[in-house]
């Protein structure tokens, strides 16, 4: 897909670090599969991966986690 930020380059498969904040919880997830622009570095995470990340953030929030750093593990 063409990068919507810089509009100069097609994205390529890579990884991203995603930070989510919810109800006093900060969750950092590394090595998330994403499409990444080689020019500007913009990262695009797919819908199913996004749903999974949001579920993890919700679970961490319900568990009372304040700050957590995790590595993404493929399902």
Image (tube, helix red, strand yellow):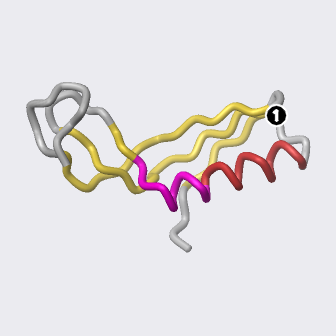
Residue 52: where, in percent of width, then height? 61, 59
Q: Quadrant of residue 16?
A: top left
Q: How many marks?
A: 1
Residue visible at 19% across and 49% down in the picture: 1
Provide residue 66's location: percent of width, then percent of height: 82, 34
**Depicted 25 relative to depicted 30: above or below:** above
Residue found at x 71% / y 41%: 68
Is the magenta region chiefly helix, strand or loop?
helix
Name the residue located 66 percent from the left edge and 49 percent from the top edge: 54
Image-based side of 41 in relation to 27, left or right: left
Q: Quadrant of the C terminus?
A: bottom right
Local packing at callout 1 (Cα closer than 10 Å; few below 14, some 14-19, many 20+) is some
Q: From the viewer's perspective, tell me whether residue 73 is left or right of residue 36.
A: right
Residue marked by disc 1: 66
Pick out the residue farthest to the bottom: 75
Question: Which residues make up the magenta segment?
Answer: 45-52
Q: Does the magenta stretch include residue 12?
A: no
| Lateral position of residue 1 relative to residue 57, left or right | left
State yes or no: residue 48 in magenta: yes
- Secondary structure beneath disc 1? loop
**Residue 71 image offset from top left, x and y in percent:** 56, 54
**Relative image position of residue 32 (x, y in whole percent):** 46, 53
Residue beneath the point at 48% across and 55% down: 47
């Amino acid at each position: 897909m063409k990068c919507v930020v810089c509009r100069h380059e097609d994205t390529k498969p890579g990884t991203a670090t995603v930070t989510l904040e919810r109800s006093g919880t900060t969750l950092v997830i590394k090595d998330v599969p994403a499409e990444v622009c080689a020019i500007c570095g913009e990262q695009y995470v797919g819908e199913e991966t996004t749903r999974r990340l949001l579920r993890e953030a919700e679970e961490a929030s319900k568990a009372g986690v304040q700050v957590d750093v995790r590595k993404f593990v493929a399902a």
